[in-house]
Structures are given as C-alpha cells and as structure tokens.
Amino acid sequence: MKRKKSIIAATIMVIAVIGWWIYSKIPVATRESVGKSVMSVAVEVTPIKKSLIREVGVFTGTLLPESQFIVAPKIAGKLNKLFVNIGVHVKQGQLIALLEDEELVQQVDQARAELAVARANLEESRSALNLAQREFERAQALRKKKIVSESELDAAEAQYRAGMAKQKVAIAQVAQKEAELKTSQVRLDYTRMKASWADGGNPRIVGERFVDEGAMLAANTPVVSIIDIHTLTAVIHVIEREYPRIMMGQDAVITTDAYPDRAFRGTIARIAPLLKEAARQARVEVAIPNPERLLKPGMFVRVEIEFNRRANATVVPVNALTKHDGRQGIFLADMETMRAKLIPVTVGIVSNDMAEIVEPPVSGMVVTVGQHLLEDGAVITVPEKRKDETSNR
C-alpha cells in the first residue's frame, strides 16, 4: 500500500514538472492574451464625430419693463373719473383720470373776471393820463405866453405825473391778475391727469391700477402705473469667473416656460461696473425687442450667452471621459482586435453632453459605458447590435 502511494505521488510530481516546462515554453504575450480573454469587459461604444460645438453660459433672471412710471395727482381731491384700466394701451398726452374740479373752475372764472377789471382800470388810467398830458402841454404853452401862472403849470405837471404813476399801478395789477389766472388754470389742469413721457413714439400700456373712482386722494397718491413693454430688460447676475467674458453688444438667447417652443433674441445692454460684495455677483441687463408683446414683465427667463464656438471640432460624449493616474483620457475601441486603448487627451469646450478633444487627433470608436472597468489593452466585448452598426459605418 505504501509503495502504491509513493508511485502515485511520484507520477503527480512528474506530470507537474512536465506541465510547468510546457507552460514556460509558451510566449508571455500568448499567456497574457489567454488570461485577459477570460477577463473581457462588456462595453458600449460610439463613433467619434466632427461637429460644431459651442460654449454657452446659462443664467436665470427676471424680465423688467424698459421704462415704468406712476400717474399721480399733484393736488388733493376726489377721483371723479378714471378713463383707463389694466392692459389698456395709452398714447402720449392721453387723459388718464379726472379729479373733481368745480371749485377750481370757479377760481379760474373769478381770476378771469378780476383780470378783466384790471384791464379796464388800465384803460381808464391811460385815458386819464392822456388827458393829464394834454392839460400839461397846454399849460406849458400858455405859461410861455404869460397867460397862466407858475402855480397852475405846476398843478398841471403834478396831475400828469400822478396819471403816469396810476398807469404803472394799473399795468402791474394786470400782470398780477394774469399770473393769478395762470396759477388757477394750472391748478385746474392738475385735476386732469395725463400720460406723458419723453419719447412719445410707441404707445405704452397700463400695468396696475391702485385706486377706484370716488376715492379721496392726497397729492402724489398713485393712480395707475404705465409701462413700456415694446422692449424688455432681462436682469441676470453673473459670478466673478464669468464676469470678464460678458461684453457689451453680445448676443443672447432668451427662453421662458410661458413659450417653451420659442426663443427670443436679445443684446447685452448694460453691465454693472462692480460686483456686490455679499454675493460676489454683478448685474447684467439684456435688452429684448418685444414687438409682439408676448413677453411680460415679471416672467422668469433663462438667458444663454455664447462665449466660444468651434466648427468641425472633434467631439465625444462627455461620459466617454475618464481619469487614470490623475490624467483625463478616453478609451478607443479597436473593433478588429476587440481591445481598448487608453488615450490621454486635452479637453476643450464642454457643452451639454458633448466634449471637444483638442489633443491628440483621434478617430474611430470610443467607449462610453464600462470604461471604469478597463485598463489599457483590456479585452472588450460589444453587443451584437452595436457591432452591426459599427460594421455598417
């Protein structure tokens, strides 16, 4: 029995030695290939493309009217009539509201009557002056002929000078009454609130109404707000890193949830010269033409500003990028040998789900799923459907 066991052990040892000798004669590359074929990794691949790629900054903000002002009375009074409501278009000089004006109308009539009296007094003083002047001139002529005494001449001269003084007083009274009439007319005009702005070209629209007819208003009480929505302003805030890339006149694309299938064009109109210390952000205003009046103040918007673009760039899906030994790279798939090759790359513009490969020049198929399991030279397997698509290319 012991002899039998010894023979079996010796036989096993001889077989092991022979096996090791045979394995040592196999080339190292062949042994590695055999080992790796056992450890093949299933991946998905996609072709590397040439395409236009854009670097776009996306910001959120709010729409504001290009201009806005409040219509308010300059004097206190009862709101007698309101001629407009929210959403109504108004033109330059259009009557918006009317205060109760009976008392002021009476004041205008009284001032006008007092002015008429003052003018009548002026005419009377002129007539009296003319008469006094003729008397004075007659007295001078008679005095030369020694017909009237010196005292009579002096009396005629005094009468003439008094007439001139009365005329000056009458003229001043007319001017005073004219000023009082203008004042009363201005106060009466204050009861008529009108829409007025510097540029009277485009009609504007009533944004808000603050009071109702019959309300007692103090001076400067808001009645309605009038806004200009022919052009709107999108206000966004940019951080310090992006601030130097924003330029005056730069084009922008504006989208909003109200019109998900439409994009509106705008232009960078104003850039704040400072960043707010609390948020480290700068205010940027984008002017948006709004001829159809579709956009409204207060809407939430997204503003896209293009910083850079490259035509005919080499692009791969973002999920194809991987990191090995601290360097960014991609795995190229050799569809003939079914192996993956790690290529360190320099990435340029990254936009949405695509990334630009600046260096080195690459082409072919790139691994997009499963690359985290790969090493350089690893054996890969690709789904049959993907193989067919690759061969057709």
Image (cartoon, rainbow, N blue to C red):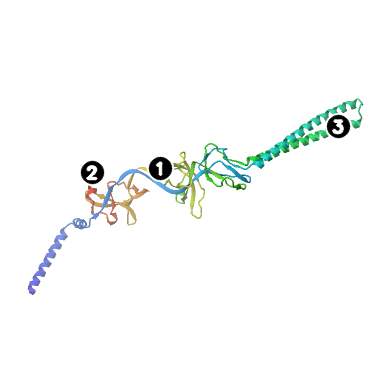
- Quadrant where the C terminus sits is top left
Give the amino acid type for the residue marked by disc 3 in the picture: Glu
* Horizontal arrangement in the rendering, residue 76 relative to residue 331 (left or right): right
Q: Sequence order check: which comes first, mark 3 or mark 1?
A: 3
Q: Secondary structure at mark 1?
A: strand
SS category of the residue bearing label 2: helix
Pick the front one: 365 or 5: 365
Instruction: Determine the image quadrant of residue 13.
Output: bottom left
Q: Residue at x 44, y 41 (%)?
A: 265
Residue 383 coordinates in the image, percent (x, y): 23, 51
Q: Residues within 10 Å of mark 2 (few under 14, many from 20)?
A: few
Residue depicted at x 42% and y 48%: 58
Q: Quadrant of residue 306?
A: top left
| Residue nearest the observer in this picture, 208 or 245 | 208
Alpha-carbon span between mark 3 and mark 1: 91 Å
Image quarter of the N terminus: bottom left
Label 3 secondary element:
helix
- How busy is the neighbourhood of tag 3: few (under 14 within 10 Å), some, or many (20 plus)? some
What residue sits right under mark 3 in the picture?
157
Which residue type does callout 1 highlight? Arg
Image x and y of residue 6, in percent = 9, 72
Closer to viewer: mark 2 or mark 3: 3
Mark number for residue 262? 1
Against 104, residue 237 (above or below) is below
Identify the disc placed on residue 271: none
Answer with left or right where residue 233 lies relative to residue 46: right
Judged by depth in the image, the label closer to the viewer, 1 or 2, is 1
Q: Position of residue 370 (x, y in %)?
A: 28, 54
**Amino acid type, callout 2:** Asn
Q: Earlier in the sequence, mark 1 or mark 2?
A: 1
Classify residue 258 as left or right of residue 25: right
